[in-house]
Image (cartoon, rainbow, N blue to C red):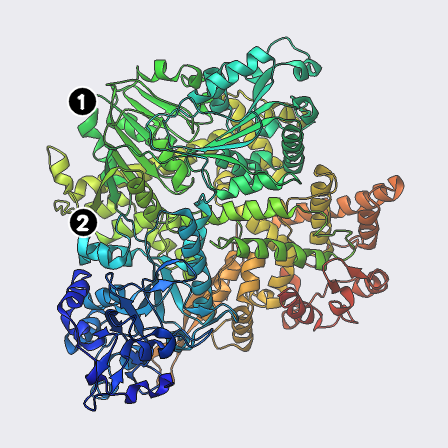
Amino acid sequence: MKSLQNLRSIETSCWSHKTAADHVQEWLDSGVDPGIIALNVETLIDTAVNGYAESLFPIAERLNWNITRFGQKTRSHLRGWWVSGVDPFNAWQRMAWGRFKPDAATPVLDRTKGKPAKYLSPRLGAGSSRLVLLDVPQSIWDKVAQRYNTPITPADRPCGFWCWVWKWNIPVIVTEGEKKAGCLLTQGYAAIALPGIFSGYRKETQQLIPELAYFATVDRSIYICFDYETKPKIIKNINLAITKLGTLLDAAGCSVQVITLPGSQKGVDDFIVAHGQQSFEDLYKVALPLQFWLASRLWALTYPAAIALNTPYVSDLPYPDSGLACIKSAKGTGKTTALQPLIQKAASTGRKVLVISHRIQLGRAICKDIGIDWIEEIKGLEIQNLQNLSGYGLCIDSLHPTSQARFNPQSWKGAIVILDEVEQVLWHVLNSSTCYQHRIKILETLRELVQVVLSSGGLIIAQDADLSDVSIDYLKGLVDESIDPWIVVNDWKPETGWAVSFYDTKNPAPLLSQVSEFIQKGAVYIAVDSQKVSGKWSSKNLETYLQSCYPHKRILRIDSESVADPLHPAYEILKRLNQVISTYDIVLATPTIGTGISIDIKGHFQAVFGIFQGVTSDTESRQALARVREPVPRLVWAARFGPRKVGNGSCSYQDVIHSTTKAVKYNIALLKEVDFDIDVQTDPITLRSWAKMAARVNLSLWSYRNEFHNGLVMEGHKVTTISDDSLNLPPDIRSLDAEQFDTEQPDIEQLDSKQFNSQQTEKSKTQSIEQIIQEDPQGNVLKLSGGEPLQEQNDEAIAKQTIAEILAQIKAIQQQSRLREAQAISRAADLTFTEYNRLKDQRSKTIAERYAQTKHELQRRYPIPVTPELKIKDDEGWYAQLRLHYYLSHDLSFVQLRDLKELQEHLDHGNGKVALQDVKLLTAQVETLRVLGILNFLDSDRRVRATDTDVQQLYERANQYRHDIKTILNLTISNKMKPIEVIQALLGKLGLKLTCVGRDVAQDGRRGGLRVYQYRQPEDGRDIIFAQWQQQETIAQATETTETKEASQHAATSALISMIPIADPDPPSDIDQFDRSKAGSNQLQGKTQKQSSLNSYRHRINVDVALDSLLPDSLASHQHHEVLAIKLLTLIR
């Protein structure tokens, strides 16, 4: 028996027919270059005779078969092709390991599968599989070098192509199968062939195979491109393989991205042959980073379907009598209408029906369709009689015992519970601000409701166009028993979708310029995702703009304020939506017109416009485009990035969980005497489901425009991309507009530093757009590359001047609207506390009442008169900055007491449990900034340079602990940032900055040395606010301590509060009174008196950390905060 290592010495010329014509054709059909075929593929037959008349068995030798068992006489007809590449561990010589594909006419039975084997590999035992690096001719090498703009030096040529790929860290594509790798190489991509999707790593050790590990060098881009599949089991295996392989490559330091084939061709070779190289290049360019791809899989539905449909209208579904029924079907396919027979039968038998929605208007519409009452429309009934009704609908916000509904889950035994748009219902209850105060009560009530219904023979129906495993897993997790959900999947897509013009432009101005074309023909519908005047392209500002452009047109704005304003024509419009909007020429709609609302009028709207800035997910925004059912043209603009990430912004749900949990643990560790068990007082199912949905949202927002575009394509619409790549607007206009979008930062790693940079360029914004236009009035026709020219969409060519005018007008409207609203709020009526509470809970409000409510909230937040300037600064996040600056510059006990109260409120609202995503504590933020030494730079007498010792120390520590800083401060510290940029980013959290006041002078007298920075005390009135807050804190501490002692309530909290010292009679030192040489350590008076009190309360807290390891012996020592922070930042890793 010859070993594999000796195979290369065998006289292969005796048995090789080289490559037979049929085998060459097979590879050519896969789009492989003939030179690659000649170098790597050869035809083998079962037996051959050498020059000495000796019998040879080339196939058996290659595959390491037992020749006697193989049986020469019985298998002499076997034929096929063999492929092998070069060996990175044998000086790039021919690899002895390879793969054999038998001809279809001479099959080899795979006894484990009971069918003919497609490919065969050498039998060398477990863990022996390798990969194939196909050798390439010079022409292919040159093509790859040209693609990646990398030279081929004379020193590279002797070792060959793959040695060059390894040496220069050339990006590679990992695929399954040699023909696919050959096709990709032919197109100029360095492609590695795995024998199977699970063959890139060893299952036993969970490590990359040696050959792949050799190429898994730091910072190499590795793309994974596996087959397109439709079978659920194979899809699951492919996803698992990508996840495991990608994770291992990522851990090795590679930049991992996933190429997803759209179908219907299965392999990448078939796709390229069918659609051409450019189509694959487009997929290559939009490949998702691994974490994005992992998040996208959270939308998948992998549960097997009991009923699979492909129909434009769902009807006559055979719902089960009990259990969990889940329906996935596209928008507008009649999911709600299909419920009518079931509800009618339930009514005739006295079976109760409950509809749960996340939006009031949507819930009302569903209840109307299926013939039951919405809870607010039930008149004249006592609360206790609600339990005796045969059914009703309510918003999930009211699903708890203390709501007006006084909801009792025990009243719904054997009932039918309908969760329409279940994905959004669950996301709403897990994350919305409206559920914040009662979130735990709602979630616990939902859990009890599901348990009661399913344990009593009831039926829960969960349906959604985007139904996923996440929602089903959550509902299943609410009960102890195992549940097999009944699944219906309708894969129907419209054969003729919308004609969509998708604007890949810096801003929506080119899209908005097209309104005039359609408004001449009839009405237009404009969907937006923002309402407030602070948003440039919000519903309010667009309403003002359109009124100025079309003064004789009737314009209706539908948003959360207008539908609740008794004096507005949109008041309660959703009850009569189709009737009212048919009388208007322009309708502006926010997500108030949400899922489930249908605009069915025909012939009225000539087009649907969409302007989406990433405030809502791409899924919800696409649904907004579908509110108008008529297939009129859609014109859509979406921001590149969305501004409001969830949690830490990660697309990995595990990372979101880890960050959220770790942030709370940091704070609990610093709060000391807190009786809080994070494992007992939180629900892992809720946290996991929230994190998965948060990761999906973050994925959408990080790649908002791409996700939006891909979603439209997947829904079956005809999408034409319109680009402004050739738009020659004055640079100032383009950049000025781009700065208005938080979503336009191109580098994820520099997002936070970008916020600082925008402060540095504030002076560049002082020039008005009107002035810029006057200075550069040249106008060129807007041209588009790769899409439909804008001027062809209108009778008149759209010049850049027109776009600039739109930008100028919108910006002016935004500024005027913000000022006008701020002025109105400052002049609004003053409310008493009782009046405010009544108004806050009042559903219908006029503009005057809304302004009065906002003014009262500002008065409670800031202890100074409400002015227009204060309102505008508050909109820009001033309160969060001031609050952090205040606690940083005052006694630590102030922020500790604040966090204790915050945590106790969560525990009180949740009956001893909390939703971790809602817990926002500040102690760790304050201590982290203090330890980093940020106080050192708040000295107006100091000149700061990048080479200063404390600057370098802060820079090194910030980079060392950047992951913890991200968790605690939600601030990204990139290694691309310079020391001063890091300081500016940290100061930005306080609303402060260093100002460049000059440069050092070189020895020869010329400028050009280091930049010199200085802190300038802000003249924004924060010192007055701080003084008032400090007085309030001191009084509150004294009052809180006395009351808790007298009442003897909240034992753990009161013990801690009594431990915290009352502030000194004299006001604590403010930041400007610090000894600058000792800044960064807590030098406030009274610390020595506090030491014995604090030490007496040392004990092990329930975060697996002893306080003794956190607290040094001397709280007054200069090293206290430094030691604390280092241990804090390394505490939970």
Which residue appears at 21% of the width and 21% of the height? 522
Name the one closer to the observer, 280 or 376.
280
As drawn, which residue projects farthest toward the top? 380
What residue would you read off at disc 1? 521
Judged from the image, the secondary structure of the residue bearing numbered disc 2 is loop
In this rendering, the answer to whether 42 lies above or below 477 is below
Which residue appears at 63% of the width and 60% of the height? 1071
Residue 382 locus on image (x, y percent): 68, 12
Which is more N-terminal, label 1 or label 2?
1
For label 2, the crowd category at 10 Å Cα-Cα, with few meaning under 14, some 14 to 19 and many 20 or more, is some
As drawn, which residue projects farthest toward the front? 73
Which amino acid, by three-letter code, is at mark 2? Answer: Leu
In this rendering, the answer to whether 969 lies above or below 953 is above
Name the one closer to the observer, 66 or 389.
66
Name the one closer to the observer, 593 or 893.
593
Name the one closer to the observer, 1029 or 168.
168
In this rendering, the answer to whether 761 lies above or below 1118 is above
The quadrant where residue 259 appears? bottom left
Which residue appears at 30% of the width and 40% of the height? 712
Q: Is residue 832 left or right of residue 638?
A: right
- Quadrant containing the N terminus is bottom left
Which amino acid, by three-letter code, is at mark 1? Answer: Lys
Can the viewer see residue 120 in this picture? yes
Tag count: 2
What's the CA distance linking mark 2 and mark 1? 28 Å
Residue 1103 locus on image (x, y percent): 72, 59
What residue would you read off at disc 2? 727
Residue 79 locus on image (x, y percent): 23, 69
Q: Is residue 240 left or right of residue 843?
A: left
